[in-house]
Image: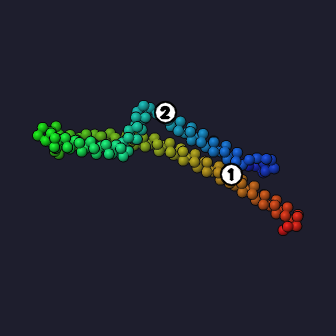
Amino acid sequence: MVHIRKHQLNDRFDVVDIIKKEIHNVEETLRKVDEFYQKDLRKLDRLSDKIARVGGSWGFISGFFVFLGLWVILNAVILSVYAFDPYPFILLNLFMSALASIQAPIILMSQNRASRRDQARLEIDLEKDLRDLHIDQSSHVILLELHRDVNAIKKKLGLK
C-alpha cells in the first residue's frame, strides 16, 4: 500500500510519480495473473478455449444456419428420391444432438477457467482501489495541512 508519511510532506516528492509507479505495479500484476492462468493450460484446455471462441460467435451461428439450409435443400429438393437423410432428417438431428452434447461442456470448461482468471483480476482491482483510496486520503491530508499553513500565513500577514 502507498503511504505518504508526514515527514515526507517536508521533503520534495512528486505525487504523479507515486501514481505512475502504482499504475505500473497494477499492470504488472495483471500481466502476471494472465501468465499464471495461461502457463498451465494443457493442449485440450487451449482447444476448448478455441472451440468456445468459435462456438460462441455469430459467425458459427450463421454458418450453422447455412449448413442446415443446405442439408435440407440437398435432401428434400435435389436428392428428393434418393436422399441419404429424408424428411424428418433423423441423421441431421443425431448430428445436432451430438454437437450440442459435446460443445456445451467444452464451452463450460473454458468459461470456468475464464471465471477463475476474472475473479483473480477483480481481487487485484479491489486491491488497486484500496491503494487509490490511501493515495486520496494522503492527498487530502496534504491539502488540509496546506490550507492550515495558508491560513496561518494570512493571519500573520493580517489578511484574515
Looking at the image, is mark 1 or mark 2 nearer the viewer?
1
Crowd band around label 2 with a 10 angstrom C-alpha radius: few (<14), some (14–19), many (20+): few
Q: Residue furthest top?
A: 43
Query: Where, by quadrant of the figure, is residue 22 drawn?
Result: top right
Q: Which color mode does the image show?
A: rainbow
**Along the line of sight, the residue nearer the viewer: 62 or 28:** 62
Say which residue label 2 marks.
40
Residue at (43% x, 43% y) in the render: 111
**Vertical side of 154 occupied by 58: above or below:** above
Asked if residue 62 lies left or right of residue 156, the reply is left
User: Is residue 90 in view?
Assistant: no
Mark 1 and mark 2: Cα distance apart in space: 36 Å
Query: Where, by quadrant of the figure, is residue 49 drawn?
Result: top left
Asked if residue 93 lies left or right of residue 43, the reply is left
Q: Are marks 1 and 2 in contact (CB under 8 Å)?
A: no
Residue 9 percent location from the top left of the image? 78, 51
Please give the label number shown on residue 82.
Answer: none
Asked if residue 83 lies left or right of residue 38, the reply is left
Residue 48 percent location from the top left of the image? 40, 37
> What's the residue type where badge 2 is placed?
Asp
Residue at (61% x, 51% y) in the render: 129
Residue at (70% x, 45% y) in the render: 17
Asked if residue 108 lies left or right of residue 63, the reply is right
Q: Could you tell me which quadrant the C terminus lies in?
A: bottom right
Say which residue label 1 marks.
135
Q: Earlier in the sequence, mark 1 or mark 2?
A: 2
Crowd band around label 1 with a 10 angstrom C-alpha radius: few (<14), some (14–19), many (20+): many
> What's the residue type where badge 1 is placed?
Ile
Q: Residue furthest front?
A: 78
Dot 1 falls on a residue whose secondary structure is helix
